[in-house]
């Protein structure tokens, strides 16, 4: 079954990291097709307004549009050549560029949704928190607007082929597993770990609200284990249907020594995982998105984070 990914590219090192990542992962994804997508710079409102009443301004705007289109195509051709040199079939690569309309992030997501891509790939921008307050971040805005299509956020040059999927028994976690099984369908080289952090009651609410904390904690853990056992039984069947064998899938469950986000990050480093997959929404209080997913997205270095809605 064919898979289509949209790579949002510009001239930055972050875009080069995204290209490097898809080359890195390509041997483990069958029937993968690539669209290299570039949103052209926005033409100033002043020039657009002036072009309505001034022929010289109209001519200048037309030339600027042509120049932007030529520069965009030259950029995308360079990235295409890089993929082809890395072994990608040129017939599997499409180049697409459009003028900016709604805004950089929204233009990327709108196009991806209209053409029904299976994922959007972007290199993570390294803005500081202060810069993001004043300037915004493409990555942050893509996360905000990408409510349907999975987003692959690449930081640095990813070296490991191992994949870690954080699961909590929720529908969102199941969609994350479904996305992983689709991407790696019928590929015997894929190595996947399903990783569950046993939550603590205080991950949901403060323990000092209760007088019978031990009984509540025990019931809470029992309920979580029942949920995750049922979940894992279902997703193992999902992998089998996708042609991914039991030997390719490892299941790990741990108790957190720190926060859930820190526990996942520690496992990523210990197991040398190059890709971590998280669902956008978790069970009940959504501890796999909100603080946890944001923590992973902000802290993961030299890795790719797949955010699945």
Image: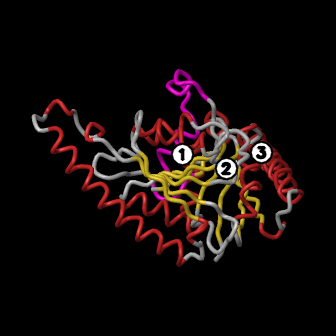
Q: Residue at x 55, y 57 (%)?
A: 193
| Principal secondary structure, stretch drawn in magenta | helix
Instruction: Identify residue for label 2.
Output: 8
Which of 259/282 is in front?
A: 259
Q: Residue 26 shows which numbered tag?
A: none
Instruction: Sort mark 2 into few (<14), some (14-19) or many (20+) by Cα contacts within 10 Å.
Output: many
At 58% from the left edge and 64% from the top edge, which residue is drawn?
118
For this rendering, which residue is in front, 64 or 181?
A: 181
Whole-angstrom CA distance, mark 1 to mark 3, is 23 Å
The answer to whether the residue labelled 2 contacts the one labelled 1, judged by CB atoms less than 8 Å apart, is: yes
Magenta segment, which residues? 127-151
Q: Quadrant of the C terminus?
A: bottom left
Q: Which of the marked residues, 1 or 3, is nearer the chain's N terminus? A: 3
Left or right: residue 193 versus residue 48 is left
Residue 130 x/y as whole percent: 53, 21
Q: Which image quarter holds the N terminus? A: bottom right
Question: Earlier along the polypeptide chain: callout 2 or callout 1?
Answer: 2
Which of label 3 and label 2 is nearer to you? 2
Q: Which residue is mark 1?
A: 142
Q: CA distance from mark 3 to mark 2?
A: 16 Å
- What's the residue at 76%, 59% (across, down)? 95
Dot label at residue 68: 3
Q: Quick check: 20 left or right of 236?
A: right
């Amino acid at each position: 079954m064919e898979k289509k990914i949209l790579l949002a590219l510009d001239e930055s090192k972050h875009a080069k990291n995204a290209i490097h990542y898809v080359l890195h992962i390509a041997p483990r994804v069958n029937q993968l097709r690539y669209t290299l997508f570039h949103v052209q710079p926005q033409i100033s409102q002043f020039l657009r307004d002036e072009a309505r009443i001034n022929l010289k301004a109209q001519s200048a705007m037309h030339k600027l549009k042509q120049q932007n289109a030529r520069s965009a195509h030259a950029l995308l051709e360079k990235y295409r050549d890089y993929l082809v040199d890395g072994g990608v079939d040129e017939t599997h690569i499409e180049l697409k560029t459009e003028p900016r309309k709604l805004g950089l992030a929204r233009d990327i997501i709108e196009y991806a949704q209209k053409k029904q891509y299976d994922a959007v790939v972007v290199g993570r921008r390294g803005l500081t928190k202060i810069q993001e307050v004043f300037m915004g971040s493409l990555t942050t805005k893509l996360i905000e607007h990408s409510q349907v299509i999975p987003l692959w956020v690449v930081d640095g040059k990813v070296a490991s082929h191992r994949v870690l999927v954080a699961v909590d028994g929720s529908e969102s976690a199941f969609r994350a597993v479904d996305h992983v099984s689709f991407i790696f369908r019928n590929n015997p080289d894929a190595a996947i770990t399903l990783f569950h952090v046993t939550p603590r009651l205080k991950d949901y609410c403060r323990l000092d609200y209760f007088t019978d904390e031990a009984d509540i904690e025990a019931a809470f853990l029992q309920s979580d284990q029942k949920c995750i056992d049922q979940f894992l039984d279902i997703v193992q069947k999902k992998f089998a249907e996708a042609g991914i064998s039991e030997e390719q899938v490892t299941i790990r469950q741990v108790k957190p020594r720190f926060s859930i986000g820190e526990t996942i990050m520690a496992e990523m480093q210990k197991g040398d995982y190059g890709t971590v997959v998280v669902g956008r929404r978790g069970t009940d209080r959504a501890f796999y998105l909100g603080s946890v997913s944001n923590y992973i997205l902000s802290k993961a270095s030299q890795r790719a984070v797949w955010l699945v809605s």
